[in-house]
Amino acid sequence: MLKVRIIPSLLLREGRCVKGVKFRDFRDTGNPVTAAKIYDAQGADELLFLDITASTEKRSILFDIVSKTAEACFMPLCVGGGIRSIEDIRKLLLVGADKVSINTAALDRPEFINEAAEVFGNQCIVASIDVRKRVDGEYEVFSDCGTKARGIGPVEWAKEAVAQGAGEILLTSIDQEGTRKGYDLGLIRMVADTVEVPVIASGGVGSLQDLVDGIVRGHASAVSAASIFHFTDQSIIKARTYMKEAGLDVRSMELR
């Protein structure tokens, strides 16, 4: 059984860290390399670097920030945003990324996941799935920083992404993101119980108990959070201690 991972996420916009609510109203939260160093020192299992406007602006990824972060930190980096080609992935891995998160390009052309997995291995490819609940109560996948409805449900798309070769799913509830009201546990459980690859829960953490619930009640393999670490006195260290006391098999900092 894999140990539970605690994964802080950093959203990048114009080279700075930002945080919003429901993928809107972003505010500056600091320098990404500085933030990454803090998470590394606290023993984060991994770090998510997501360039939130690279796809919608159709521009290249911020390779220099990834490179500087990789040089300064020891934790694995998963980078997403604006990845459109095998060459983009190759460049990211060369500057220090360990995994890549693919969203819009995979929805545009699902076989891109398969092509990337064939070249770099399944363990390197994370399918990022952003989800909103429609007025009829059904879930729908969105792309382009939550601005474009794709007409497919999260379970159907997760199954297709895994069939194409994704080694992991990053599942974000847009409705919960930044609200600090807790994960959408029903959404997470629905996807996690369907696919056989690890699912990272994302969107909505407001307390350390939410992290536990993501694993115990949501059946996720890993938990991602941002606001709780940016805007409260909680930390990766406190999160690890709390989750361990709740009986979860978290990685000790020495074994990170």
Image (spheres, grey):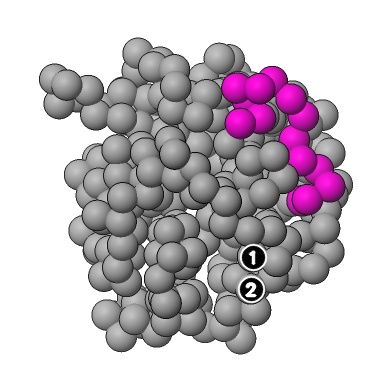
- Spot occupied by residue 157 in the image (x, y as percentages of width and height): 40, 25
Q: Is residue 128 above or below residue 40?
A: above
> 40 and 245: which one is in front?
40
Q: Is residue 197 above or below residue 133?
A: below
Q: Residue at x 69, y 59 (%)?
A: 31
- Disc 2/disc 1 C-alpha distance (Å): 5 Å
Q: Residue at x 37, y 25 (%)?
A: 141
Using residue 253 as the reference point, say whether residue 229 is left or right of it.
left
Q: Residue at x 37, y 39 (%)?
A: 22
Q: Quadrant of the N terminus?
A: bottom left
Amino acid type at circle 2 is Ile
Secondary structure beneath label 1: helix
> 62 and 164: which one is in front?
62
Magenta region: which residues?
A: 53-66
Amino acid type at circle 1 is Ala
Label 2 Cα crowd, 10 Å radius (few <14 / some 14-19 / many 20+): some
Q: Residue furthest left?
A: 136
Q: Magenta stretch mostly in which secondary structure? A: loop
- Spot occupied by residue 85 in the image (x, y as percentages of width and height): 74, 24
- Residue labelled with disc 1: 35
The answer to whether residue 107 is seen in the rendering is yes
**Quadrant in the picture for residue 81:** top right
- Residue labelled with disc 2: 38
